[in-house]
Amino acid sequence: MKVLTFGTSNSKNSINKKLAFYAAQQINNADISLIDIHDFEMPIYSVDRETEFGIPQLAHDFYNAIGAADTIVMSFAEYNGSYTSAYKNLFDWTSRIDMKVFQNKPILMLSTSPGPGGAQSVLAAAQASAPYFAATVIAAISLPSFFDNFDLEEGVVTDKTFNQSLLAAISKF
Protein backbone atom coordinates (compact mmCIF):
# COMPACT_ATOMS: atom_id res chain seq x y z
CA MET A 1 0.00 0.00 0.00
CA LYS A 2 1.37 3.39 -1.01
CA VAL A 3 1.00 5.79 1.92
CA LEU A 4 1.51 9.53 1.48
CA THR A 5 2.53 10.97 4.84
CA PHE A 6 3.05 14.55 6.02
CA GLY A 7 2.58 17.07 8.77
CA THR A 8 0.92 20.38 7.98
CA SER A 9 3.66 22.52 9.46
CA ASN A 10 6.59 23.85 7.49
CA SER A 11 8.82 23.63 10.56
CA LYS A 12 11.98 21.62 9.92
CA ASN A 13 11.39 19.96 13.30
CA SER A 14 7.64 19.47 12.89
CA ILE A 15 6.17 17.35 15.66
CA ASN A 16 3.19 16.70 13.39
CA LYS A 17 5.46 15.28 10.71
CA LYS A 18 6.99 12.99 13.35
CA LEU A 19 3.53 11.86 14.48
CA ALA A 20 2.31 11.22 10.92
CA PHE A 21 5.43 9.20 10.11
CA TYR A 22 5.06 7.15 13.29
CA ALA A 23 1.44 6.39 12.42
CA ALA A 24 2.28 5.43 8.83
CA GLN A 25 4.93 3.02 10.11
CA GLN A 26 2.21 1.12 11.97
CA ILE A 27 0.52 0.16 8.69
CA ASN A 28 1.49 -3.33 7.55
CA ASN A 29 3.30 -3.49 4.21
CA ALA A 30 3.26 0.30 3.82
CA ASP A 31 5.35 1.90 1.11
CA ILE A 32 5.70 5.27 2.84
CA SER A 33 6.28 8.49 0.95
CA LEU A 34 7.12 11.08 3.63
CA ILE A 35 6.97 14.61 2.30
CA ASP A 36 7.78 17.92 3.92
CA ILE A 37 5.43 20.74 3.00
CA HIS A 38 8.37 23.09 3.50
CA ASP A 39 9.39 21.82 0.05
CA PHE A 40 6.10 23.09 -1.41
CA GLU A 41 6.31 26.76 -0.48
CA MET A 42 4.72 29.05 -3.05
CA PRO A 43 3.60 32.67 -3.25
CA ILE A 44 0.47 33.41 -1.24
CA TYR A 45 -2.54 32.40 -3.30
CA SER A 46 -4.52 35.12 -5.03
CA VAL A 47 -6.75 35.07 -8.06
CA ASP A 48 -4.56 37.81 -9.56
CA ARG A 49 -1.44 35.64 -9.28
CA GLU A 50 -3.28 32.68 -10.71
CA THR A 51 -4.53 34.73 -13.66
CA GLU A 52 -1.12 36.23 -14.35
CA PHE A 53 1.17 33.26 -13.72
CA GLY A 54 -1.02 30.15 -13.60
CA ILE A 55 -0.90 27.47 -10.94
CA PRO A 56 2.64 26.77 -9.68
CA GLN A 57 4.23 23.44 -10.53
CA LEU A 58 4.61 22.67 -6.81
CA ALA A 59 0.81 22.60 -6.45
CA HIS A 60 0.65 20.12 -9.33
CA ASP A 61 3.40 18.06 -7.70
CA PHE A 62 1.45 17.91 -4.43
CA TYR A 63 -1.77 17.00 -6.23
CA ASN A 64 0.05 14.26 -8.16
CA ALA A 65 1.59 12.89 -4.95
CA ILE A 66 -1.92 12.54 -3.53
CA GLY A 67 -3.05 10.85 -6.73
CA ALA A 68 -0.19 8.34 -6.62
CA ALA A 69 -1.02 7.27 -3.06
CA ASP A 70 -3.44 4.57 -1.97
CA THR A 71 -4.03 6.34 1.33
CA ILE A 72 -2.92 9.43 3.25
CA VAL A 73 -1.72 9.89 6.81
CA MET A 74 -1.57 13.55 7.74
CA SER A 75 -1.16 15.38 11.02
CA PHE A 76 -2.39 18.91 11.57
CA ALA A 77 -0.46 21.59 13.37
CA GLU A 78 -2.60 24.33 14.85
CA TYR A 79 -1.68 28.00 14.68
CA ASN A 80 -4.04 30.27 16.57
CA GLY A 81 -6.80 27.67 16.48
CA SER A 82 -6.63 27.07 12.74
CA TYR A 83 -4.53 25.72 9.85
CA THR A 84 -0.93 26.76 9.45
CA SER A 85 -0.47 29.38 6.76
CA ALA A 86 1.94 27.07 4.89
CA TYR A 87 -0.62 24.26 4.65
CA LYS A 88 -3.55 26.57 3.89
CA ASN A 89 -1.64 28.16 1.04
CA LEU A 90 -0.59 24.80 -0.39
CA PHE A 91 -4.16 23.57 -0.09
CA ASP A 92 -5.60 26.71 -1.70
CA TRP A 93 -3.30 26.46 -4.71
CA THR A 94 -3.94 22.71 -5.06
CA SER A 95 -7.71 23.18 -4.88
CA ARG A 96 -7.46 25.37 -7.99
CA ILE A 97 -6.34 22.28 -9.92
CA ASP A 98 -9.32 20.28 -8.69
CA MET A 99 -11.66 20.91 -5.75
CA LYS A 100 -11.45 17.16 -5.13
CA VAL A 101 -7.96 17.68 -3.73
CA PHE A 102 -7.92 14.35 -1.88
CA GLN A 103 -9.21 12.38 -4.86
CA ASN A 104 -11.44 10.06 -2.80
CA LYS A 105 -8.50 8.64 -0.88
CA PRO A 106 -8.96 7.20 2.60
CA ILE A 107 -7.29 9.53 5.07
CA LEU A 108 -6.15 9.14 8.64
CA MET A 109 -6.21 12.63 10.15
CA LEU A 110 -4.11 13.28 13.21
CA SER A 111 -3.11 16.31 15.21
CA THR A 112 -0.78 17.16 18.05
CA SER A 113 0.63 20.12 19.89
CA PRO A 114 2.90 20.72 22.87
CA GLY A 115 -0.15 21.61 24.96
CA PRO A 116 -3.04 19.60 26.35
CA GLY A 117 -5.43 20.61 23.53
CA GLY A 118 -3.58 18.49 20.98
CA ALA A 119 -4.65 20.81 18.13
CA GLN A 120 -8.20 19.49 18.33
CA SER A 121 -9.74 22.69 16.91
CA VAL A 122 -7.98 22.42 13.57
CA LEU A 123 -8.52 18.66 13.47
CA ALA A 124 -12.27 19.17 13.89
CA ALA A 125 -12.29 21.82 11.14
CA ALA A 126 -10.34 19.56 8.77
CA GLN A 127 -12.61 16.61 9.43
CA ALA A 128 -15.75 18.68 8.94
CA SER A 129 -14.59 20.08 5.59
CA ALA A 130 -13.07 16.83 4.27
CA PRO A 131 -16.14 15.64 2.30
CA TYR A 132 -16.13 18.84 0.25
CA PHE A 133 -12.63 18.00 -0.97
CA ALA A 134 -13.21 14.29 -1.71
CA ALA A 135 -11.57 12.92 1.43
CA THR A 136 -12.78 9.75 3.08
CA VAL A 137 -11.75 10.20 6.71
CA ILE A 138 -11.26 6.82 8.36
CA ALA A 139 -10.44 8.41 11.72
CA ALA A 140 -9.42 11.68 13.33
CA ILE A 141 -7.22 11.30 16.42
CA SER A 142 -5.51 13.92 18.55
CA LEU A 143 -2.40 13.39 20.66
CA PRO A 144 -2.25 15.97 23.47
CA SER A 145 0.97 17.16 25.10
CA PHE A 146 3.29 15.80 22.42
CA PHE A 147 6.49 16.00 24.44
CA ASP A 148 4.90 14.06 27.32
CA ASN A 149 3.49 11.36 25.03
CA PHE A 150 6.14 10.88 22.34
CA ASP A 151 9.61 9.43 22.88
CA LEU A 152 11.79 11.51 20.54
CA GLU A 153 14.78 9.16 20.84
CA GLU A 154 12.78 6.08 19.87
CA GLY A 155 10.33 7.90 17.58
CA VAL A 156 7.29 6.31 19.20
CA VAL A 157 4.08 7.37 20.89
CA THR A 158 4.01 6.24 24.52
CA ASP A 159 0.33 6.99 25.18
CA LYS A 160 -1.51 3.65 25.22
CA THR A 161 -4.95 5.11 24.52
CA PHE A 162 -3.68 6.91 21.42
CA ASN A 163 -1.95 3.76 20.19
CA GLN A 164 -5.11 1.69 20.65
CA SER A 165 -7.13 4.25 18.69
CA LEU A 166 -4.45 4.35 16.01
CA LEU A 167 -4.41 0.57 15.56
CA ALA A 168 -8.22 0.51 15.39
CA ALA A 169 -8.13 3.20 12.69
CA ILE A 170 -5.40 1.48 10.69
CA SER A 171 -7.41 -1.73 10.62
CA LYS A 172 -9.91 0.14 8.39
CA PHE A 173 -7.40 0.50 5.54
Image (cartoon, grey):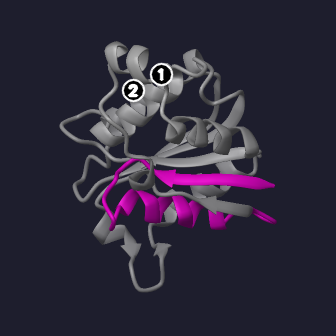
Give x and y (percent) for residue 76. 40, 45
Q: Quadrant of residue 134?
A: top right
Which of the pair 97/150 is nearer the observer? 97
Q: Residue at x 39, y 26 (%)?
A: 125
Q: Are marks 1 and 2 in contact (CB under 8 Å)?
A: yes
The furthest residue to the left: 80
Figure check: 100 above or below 112: above
The range drawn in magenta is 1-30
Residue at x 33%, y 65% (from the top left corner): 12
Which residue bears the numbered disc 1? 128
Q: Residue at x 24, y 53 (%)?
A: 116
Q: Amino acid at mark 2?
A: Ala
SS at mark 2? Answer: helix
26 inside magenta stretch: yes
Percent of width and height locating residue 56 = 48, 34
Mark 1 and mark 2: Cα distance apart in space? 5 Å
Residue at image position (76%, 62%) is 30
User: What numbered label is drawn on residue 125?
Assistant: 2
Q: Is residue 147 left or right of residue 161?
A: left
